[in-house]
Amino acid sequence: MTAITLAQADRLIDAILARGAELDCRPLSVIVVEPGCKVKAFKKEDGSAMGRSSKLVKVRAEEKPIFMRYLIAATGEQIFPEGGGLQIRDAGGEVIGAVGVTGDTEERDEELATHGIRAIGLKTDEDCATMGRRHGIRLTNR
């Protein structure tokens, strides 16, 4: 199994941050991991944060306990149930890593993740959808 290279991860993150600036997004944090969820690269723009007071963090914890449980346990958990994360696939459809973007809306974060993957010549699950079962690609829960 091949993994995303450091050079690819750096270029992917830089493409996401540049596009985020073009779209005037809120400050972003971007992480790229290789298979097995091992961190390959991470950048956090100045000013990126949860974007809310601790009182609102408490409200969020009460409204979305699963989200907060994973946030608190992020160093030990390998699943984060929020939008903005995508698998990274090579030209043959093999998973070589994943990228997570956070800072703006879930939809915008995912749009930026897609942009970064494609900007460096790699593929998303959507790009490989016609490859089917052989690659374990599912775009829906059905």
Image (spheres, rainbow, N blue to C red):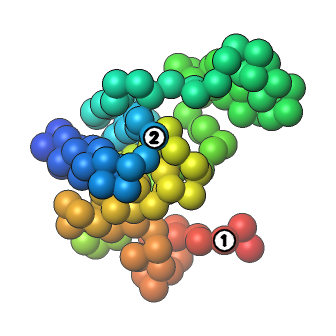
Specify the quadrant of the image occupied by residue 122: bottom left
Toward the viewer: 30 or 26?
26
Toward the viewer: 102 or 85?
102
Identify the residue under disc 2.
Answer: 26
| Drawn side of residue 92 relative to residue 82, left or right | left
Give the mark toward the camera: 1 or 2.
Answer: 2
Question: Among all residues in the image, which is located at the extreme left?
Answer: 7
Q: Residues within 10 Å of mark 1 (few under 14, many from 20)?
A: few
| Drawn side of residue 108 relative to residue 38, left or right | right
Could you say where residue 124 lies in the image, as x and y percent from the top left?
Answer: 40, 66
Q: Which quadrant of the figure contains the C terminus? A: bottom right
- Residue 98's label in the rendered image is none
Identify the residue under disc 1.
Answer: 140
Could you say where residue 68 lies in the image, as x and y percent from the top left?
Answer: 72, 26
What type is the residue that disc 1 sits on? Thr
| Drawn side of residue 19 relative to residue 54, left or right | left
Q: Earlier in the sequence, mark 1 or mark 2?
A: 2
Q: Residues within 10 Å of mark 2 (few under 14, many from 20)?
A: some
Q: Is residue 65 above or below residue 136?
A: above
The secondary element bearing badge 1 is classed as loop
The structure residue drawn at horizontal position 41% and vertical position 35%, both measured from the top left corner, is 27
Q: Is residue 128 above or below residue 11?
A: below
Question: Among all residues in the image, which is located at the extreme front?
Answer: 24
What type is the residue that disc 2 sits on? Arg
Res. 12 visible in picture = no
| Drawn side of residue 55 relative to residue 70, left or right | right
Asked if the residues shown at circle 1 and circle 2 are in contact, with their CB atoms under 8 angstroms apart, the answer is no
